[in-house]
Amino acid sequence: MSTFFNRRAFVSLSVFIFFIVILVTSVLMFFKPHTPLVALVHTGIGFLLLTIAIWHLKNNFSSLKTYFKLRQSKSGAAFGLALPIAVLCGATMLGLAITQSAPFLTLYEWGNKLRAGEKSEEKIQFSYVRVNNTKAGAQGNKLVIDLRKGPYFRWPQYAFWLETMEGEFIQPLYITEKLANNKFVVKQTLRDKREVFNSDVSGYDDETWGKLFAEEYSPETAYQRVRPESLPVFLHQLGSKTADNIFSPTDEIALKNTSPKQLPMDAFAGATIVDSFLLSSQSAKSLPDKYRVRFEINQAFDFNKHYSSDRFPDDPIYSGNGYSAQPSVIYEAIVDAQTSQQYYPMTLIGHGHHSGADGKIYTNIDNLTTSKQIIDRIIIEVQKD
């Protein structure tokens, strides 16, 4: 064999180096949401490691065959325990993994909790969706809403609306469909009420979700749940109530200071847009010279140390099956049409009540964490004719 190239040394060193790379990428993918780069390196080097390992087995196949013999001594009299112990250990570990038992399940759930608390890597690469929500017959001001989602934007409910400077409701601009039609499905319930959540679990994958939350689904009652805690500021501004005094957007809205004709909520509703978006809209009639554009957003299951699942045990809404967690957050931009300003960034001004008991805006946001990063930024563009 050439002294310049030792094949066995090359194979052994390659296996060692590739193993180190796989080890590092595995640790990164366990503790943090994986990036395309880490996934690419892990997959590519994994295939190379497999190829080199097959080559390594080929070079050492004769030695490997001896390990499968139960009689290990030269005379064949001594009974070797290496093979049965290896088979037993391998079968036990594989069985525990397949049956999703400890320690594999514990390790897997721990990794999910760590990854769920990390910011989404989608902030590096994102796409915009263009949505035209201009209604037929609208004769008022034209607005374009530029929303860039933040690292914790997953599947929230939200609403844009207009108010006078005195706080009077003018009209909605865009509302998520579930909120507009009150179609909140009652299907999640804690499997173990004794388990306390004090971190954001909204990013759990489907498999972990199914292990932590049991499902109870009844077609008769599936769409009979109102969510006053979802967007309490917006819902209270609507001023419509259900018979049990819980605010709900299911009734028609009589727009104040506008045409007496009532407009249904679903006229402004649309599917929850899961990407950053540019939303074109227009008010039903001309707006005052100065007015407010407000935005409220809420995402369930985003618990933290303050808004843990056991924070308000006597509150039937917060501690029920809605999993409100951190309350809604409210953004605002004040538009002054008398100026030449065209772009207005929206500012975080507070949060709603944790269980929707009132429509107040609470300005202390010190106890909020990931909910302040659902949105990266929102800019209102006032289009001039």
Image (spheres, rainbow, N blue to C red):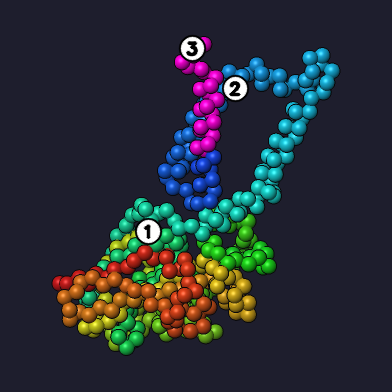
**Quadrant placement of the C terminus:** bottom left
Identify the residue at horizontal 52%, vertical 27% (top origin). Answer: 13
Highlighted range, magenta: 1-22
Q: Is residue 269 left or right of residue 34?
A: left
- Mark positioned earlier in the residue sequence (1 or 2): 2
Q: Is residue 22 visible?
A: yes
Disc 2 marks which amino acid? Answer: Leu
Q: Compared to 154, does 221 lie above or below? A: below
- Please name the predominant secondary structure of the magenta segment in the image: helix
Q: Which residue is under mark 2?
A: 57
Mark 1, residue position? 275
Q: Residue furthest front?
A: 3
Q: Residues within 10 Å of mark 2 (few under 14, many from 20)?
A: few
Q: Position of residue 93 (x, y in %)?
A: 69, 40
Residue at position x 42%, y 60% from top? 151
Cα distance in 3D space between marks 3 and 1: 59 Å
